[in-house]
Every structure is written in structure tokens, then in C-alpha cells.
Image: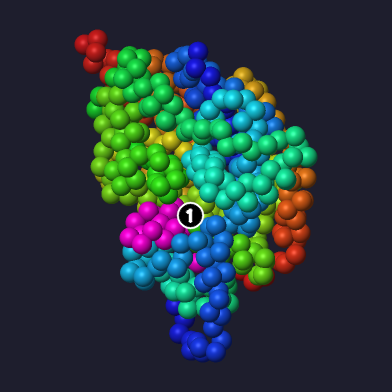
Amino acid sequence: MVKYSYFLGCQVPARVNYCDLATRRVTEALGIELIDLQGAGCCGCYLRSVDSRVALALASRILALSDKTGLDLVVLCNSCYSTLVETNEFLRENPELRTEINELLAPQDLEYKGKTKVKDIIQVFYHDYGLHKISSKVTKSFEGLKVAVQYGCHLLRPSKSTKFDNPEAPRILDDLVEVTRAKSIYWPLKLWCCGFPTLPMNREMGTSLARNKLRDAKDAGADCMVTTCPSCQISFDVLQPSTAKHYGEEYNLPVLYYPQLLGLAMNMSFKEVGLHLNRVSTKPILRFIEEKRIEATA
Amino acid sequence: MTKETVRASELDSDFKFEVAKTYEGKTVLWCVQCGMCTSNCPYSDVLDVKPHQVIKMVLLGMREQAISCKSIWLCSTCFMCAERCPQGVELGRVMFALKNIAAREKGVPEGFRLVGQQVFQTGRAMEITAFREKERERLELPKTQTDSEDIKKLLKKLKFDKLLKDKGDQQW
């Protein structure tokens, strides 16, 4: 069994436990073992605005905890991913910063060694497990389902550091969605920000970006959105009703976290992947599956 | 941008070097003011000071204006600016460098202060409510475990609590 350290970040247990649930169920079924990283806290991404060194210290602490396990570190959150990856980069390029950080960590019996490779769960599916093998596990077809694929910013950018995919024309998540035979549609705002990071500073402005994208996805004919970032998931799913109310609009766009879609395609039940916990009703997806089943038996 | 006369004698010509000396702001000097960042900023229609203008302020030495403008705090950190910059200016990172200086000298805006206090107290940026704890139990998800005291010690050593307290957010 392939093993990884597993770091949840702040947003998942606080707002979207279903991301964790779906990830655990799907990885178990694929034979990927995730071992919770004990003691880890905030990665520092929000605090970077206030004090970059504080963010660096918090991120290094997580990487140092992970160094002890000797395993690659899997994260769900795009912001955790980029913060940790950029921290590895900063500490590699600035030895004096590294010394400073290690002096801070020493009293906690921790040392940043820079050995930990950080991976987003999507990279584990696509590269480590392999797209081809994933497709062999898919037993349910979503043919005809139109999906607006939402990458989120911090996997794609800054691409020199995140090294995730082509930042202007990414394919990884599109391919992972399309192994279920669903179609990744073109929508003009696909690569844009969900506005989540602006929310604490200016709720109205942050919400406006989510609204633009929700309307764009609807206009492009999406049946649902599929994301790979818990923050995007909060912006588009958890906050969708309040955004709709604020603008006096209706979107009713189901927003799935990628492992939820994959789980369904692997014949897991709605509840197993936590689709009953999404804020916006995911019943249209259930109806889609049921209609398919009727078609298949007819 | 508001129209005001800037006197050459009031400029701080060392400011650009102050920013370029930080590891976040090291690319600021490469800017040629092409405007690509502003063209790609999701907020360029609503910001009173546009991203390329923030950089121009740094390059000209308009220190006070650069660290007082709200745009730096409204940045969504989407990094579209940096990604498409033909000069390789890591604009999102330069914004972090500017916000760091602003936080020290002008105070931390309330939204960021609240998140900061949350991390200081609990080790996490967002509270896990009793409801969410119960939900995790019900879903048979493991309990989260955070070394909040160790994290607090680390933050205290970096004087983060003091930074949050020192100045109110009246500036913002």
C-alpha cells in the first residue's frame, strides 16, 4: 500500500468535512493510505500578508513535522499547497533564513530538513496512482454531464513554484473529470480566482468574483462545478446561497469536490462521499444518475 | 488614482531597495510599467490604485502612499499578475512585502487581525465549532489534533501578538 502523510489544513474541518470524507473513502478504495499528520496547525497562508516570516515559520513547522515521518505530504487545500511549496523554495534559496527558522524550531525538537515533497491530492491521483489506473476503476459513466472545472489559483500559480500544470491551459483536473466520461466544458472565467482570500478584508469584493464565475459557469451550460480546493468549495458551495441572496439571483449550481465525483464514478453511494452534506443541493446529480440507469436498462 | 502633486523632495528614493531587499519583493525593480498586471487583475475595475500604479509608487519612492493604499490589502493573491508579467516581476509577492511594512507601520486591518488572533489562540485560522466536531464524529472522521501551545510559543517568539496589538486598524 502506498503511504502518505496527510494534512487537512484549517478550512476542511471547520467548514467542509465532506471534502475529507470523500478523500478518505476514495483513497481507501484505491489502496492509498493517508496517515494524519499529528500536531500540525495553520500553514500560515493568511498571515503571510501580515508578516511573511510568521507564515514561513508556521509552514516550516508543518514541513519539519512531516520530515519526521519520512513520507510525502498530501494536502487538500490549494493555499496549503502553494504556501508549503513556496516555503521549500524560499528556504532552499536563502540559507540564512533556514538557519533562523531552525533556531526557532529547535526548542520544539523540530528541524526543517527540506526533505518533504508536498503533493496535492490531485497530483497523487494523476501522477502517482496514474490517470490510466484511475480510469480502470471507473464503473459508472457520467456521459452527457457538463462540468465546469475549477482549479483554483494556488495550484496553477505562481507556476514557476507550484510546477503543477500549464498555468494557461491546464489539463490534469480536466482529464480526471473526463475519465468519468463527463465533459469538461469551456467557460471563459475558468482560470480566475473565486475571491475567497479577499473575504476577510472586503466581503462584497470577494463575493463579486464568486458571483461572476457562478454566472459564467451557468451561462456556459454547466450542470455542476467540480473543484479541487476547499476554499473554492466554500466560495461556490457553502456561500452560494448568501451570494445568490445578496445579488437577488438564483444559481442552483451543484458544486462537487473532485473526490466526490470520482467516488460516485467508482460506484460509491451518495452518502459515502458526503454529497448529502454539500450546501447546494446535489440532487440534480442523483437524478442524472437515475435517468442514466433507466436508459441503460431500457 | 487621486490627483495630487508629489514633490520630488518628498520622495524616498531608497524605498525600492528596501522592498527589493526582502525575499518576497526581490523582483520589484524589473518592472517596465507595461500594465500587463493591471490588465489581468480581477479587481482592476474597482481598485482606486491599480497594481501597476502600486509598483510605480514603489519605484518612484512614494513610500507613504504605497503602504497606505488599500489596494495592497484587497489583493486576492490570485497571482495572475505575476504569471503573465513579461518581466518576471513576482507581483503577488511584492504585495506581501508591502503589506508586511504596512502592518508594522500602519497597523493590521481588522479582517486579518481576527484571523491572526484565531491562529495565535488556537493554532488554526478557522475555529472548529462543536457542531463540526460532532459532524466529524458522526462521519467517523478522526479528531483533529493541533499543538496549539507550541504554535503560540513560536508566534510569541516572533512577536506576532505584539504586531497584532500594537496599532489598531483605524488606518484601514
Left or right: residue A76 versus residue B172 is left
Q: Is residue B170 above or below residue A234?
A: below
Name the spot of residue A143 as percent of width and height, x first: 25, 24
Q: Is residue A24 above or below residue A110?
A: above
Q: Please provide the residue range marked out in magenta.
A: B71-92
Name the spot of residue B89 as percent of width and height, x first: 42, 61
- SS under mark 1: loop
Name the spot of residue A212 as percent of width and height, x first: 37, 52
Residue drawn 71% across the image and 51% down it: B117
The question of residue A111 being in magenta is answered with no
* Along the line of sight, the residue nearer the viewer: A57 or A137: A57
Task: Quadrant for the N terminus of chain B, please.
Answer: bottom left
Q: Is residue B112 above or below residue A135?
A: below
Instruction: Examine the image and state in which quarter residue A152 appears.
Output: top left
Residue drawn 40% across the image and 41% down it: A163
Q: Can residue A122 be seen in this snapshot?
A: yes
Residue bearing the label numbered 1: B77
Looking at this rendering, what residue extends furthest in the left direction? A298
Task: Quadrant for the C terminus of chain B, please.
Answer: bottom right
* Along the line of sight, the residue nearer the viewer: A169 or B17: B17
User: What is the image's colouring?
Assistant: rainbow
The chain ID associated with circle 1 is B
Residue drawn 76% across the image and 37% down it: A108
Which residue type carries mark 1?
Thr
Left or right: residue A139 versus residue A19 is left
Name the spot of residue B100 as percent of width and height, x first: 61, 62
* Along the line of sight, the residue nearer the viewer: A92 or B94: A92
Q: Assess disc 1: are there few (<14), some (14-19) or many (≥20) residues with their C-alpha within 10 Å of its C-alpha.
A: many
